[in-house]
Image (cartoon, rainbow, N blue to C red):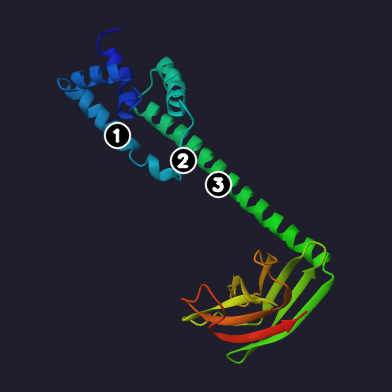
C-alpha cells in the first residue's frame, strides 16, 4: 500500500464530510498539491449533488451516514472495482434509507392525526348517544335555508352542535355560536362552514357563571371578538 492509497480510499468520505477533523485537515493539505484527487473529489460531489432531492428532509439517526458508507466501502474495497461503483452504491443506499426514514416520520404523523380524529369522533358520538334532549331551529342566510341542531347530554353537560345548509360567512363577517344565559349572552365557538358540508363541534358549558337557557347563531363583524353580539342574529332557540 502506497502513501497515496489512503487518499484514494477516503475520497468519498471526504466529499460527504464523514472524516473527523484531523483526517479532514490531512486530506485538504493533500488536495492542495494533488490535481488527481481534486478532480476525483469534484466528480464525486457532482455525482452526489442530486441526492438531497431524492427524499423529504429528515434528521438521520446518530452515525447513520457513517455506518452506511462504511458498509458500502468495506465491500467495495474488497472488490477493488471501478471508481464509480462505490459512489453509485453509497448514493443508492443513502437514498433508500433516507426515503425509509422520511416515510417513517410521515407515517407516524399520519397515525397521530388519525388517532386524534378518531378520539374526536368517539367524543362526538358519546355526546350524541347520551343526549337527553335534541333541539333544532331553522336558519336562513342569503336565501339559503339551513338549520341549527343541538344534542344536549344532560349527564356530562356537554353539547354536540351541528350547523347545516348555510353558505360560507361573508368576507366581512363570521358565524358565531352563543349560549343564551339568564345572566346574558355568552360567546361560544366560531362556526366555520366547510363548503357544502355541515359544521360540527362539541362544546362544554360556559366557564363563567351562566344559567343556560338556550342557544343562538349570529353573523358577527370580523373585528368583534369579545363582548355581546354586534351582528345579525340568524338562529335562536330556547331549552
Q: Which residue lies furthest to the bottom in this view?
A: 143
Q: How would you rate the neighbour count of disc 3 (Cα within 10 Å): few for under 14, some for 14-19, many for 20 or more?
A: some
Q: Which residue lies furthest to the left in this view?
A: 33
Horizontal side of 2 relative to 87 (left or right) equals left
Residue displayed at 83% across by 64% down: 130
- Residue at numbered disc 2: 58
| Number of dots carrying numbers | 3
Measure how far apart labels 2 and 3 are at the Cα level: 10 Å
Q: Check residue 68 in the rendering and tell me which mark sits there, or answer none.
A: none
The x and y percentages for residue 213 are 74, 77
Is 98 located above or below residue 38 in the figure?
below
In terms of secondary structure, where does tag 2 sit? Answer: loop
Position of the C terminus, as image quadrant, is bottom right
Measure how far apart labels 3 and 1 are at the Cα level: 29 Å
Is 56 located above or below residue 23 in the figure?
below
Is 36 located above or below residue 114 in the figure?
above
- Residue at numbered disc 3: 106
The x and y percentages for residue 137 are 73, 84
Would you identify the image quadrant in which residue 131 lies?
Answer: bottom right
Q: How would you rate the neighbour count of disc 1 (Cα within 10 Å): few for under 14, some for 14-19, many for 20 or more?
A: some
- Residue at numbered disc 1: 45
Residue displayed at 51% across by 82% down: 170
Amino acid at each position: 500500500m502506497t502513501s497515496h492509497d489512503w487518499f484514494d480510499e477516503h475520497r468519498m468520505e471526504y466529499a460527504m464530510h464523514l472524516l473527523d477533523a484531523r483526517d479532514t485537515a490531512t486530506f485538504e493539505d493533500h488536495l492542495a498539491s494533488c490535481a488527481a484527487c481534486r478532480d476525483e473529489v469534484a466528480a464525486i460531489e457532482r455525482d452526489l449533488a442530486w441526492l438531497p432531492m431524492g427524499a423529504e428532509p429528515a434528521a438521520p439517526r446518530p452515525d447513520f451516514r457513517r455506518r452506511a458508507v462504511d458498509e458500502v466501502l468495506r465491500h467495495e474495497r474488497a472488490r477493488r472495482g471501478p471508481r464509480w461503483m462505490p459512489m453509485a452504491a453509497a448514493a443508492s443506499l443513502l437514498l433508500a434509507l433516507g426515503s425509509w426514514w422520511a416515510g417513517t416520520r410521515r407515517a407516524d404523523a399520519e397515525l397521530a392525526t388519525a388517532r386524534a380524529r378518531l378520539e374526536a369522533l368517539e367524543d362526538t358520538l358519546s355526546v350524541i348517544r347520551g343526549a337527553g334532549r335534541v333541539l333544532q331551529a331553522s336558519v336562513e342566510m342569503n336565501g339559503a335555508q339551513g338549520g341549527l341542531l343541538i344534542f344536549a347530554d344532560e349527564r356530562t353537560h356537554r353539547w354536540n352542535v351541528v350547523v347545516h345548509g348555510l353558505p360560507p360567512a361573508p368576507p366581512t363577517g363570521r358565524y358565531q355560536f352563543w349560549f343564551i344565559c339568564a345572566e346574558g349572552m355568552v360567546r361560544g365557538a366560531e362556526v366555520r362552514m366547510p363548503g357544502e358540508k355541515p359544521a360540527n363541534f362539541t362544546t362544554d358549558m360556559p366557564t363563567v357563571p351562566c344559567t343556560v337557557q338556550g342557544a343562538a347563531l349570529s353573523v358577527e363583524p370580523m373585528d368583534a371578538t369579545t363582548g355581546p353580539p354586534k351582528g345579525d342574529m340568524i338562529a335562536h332557540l330556547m331549552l
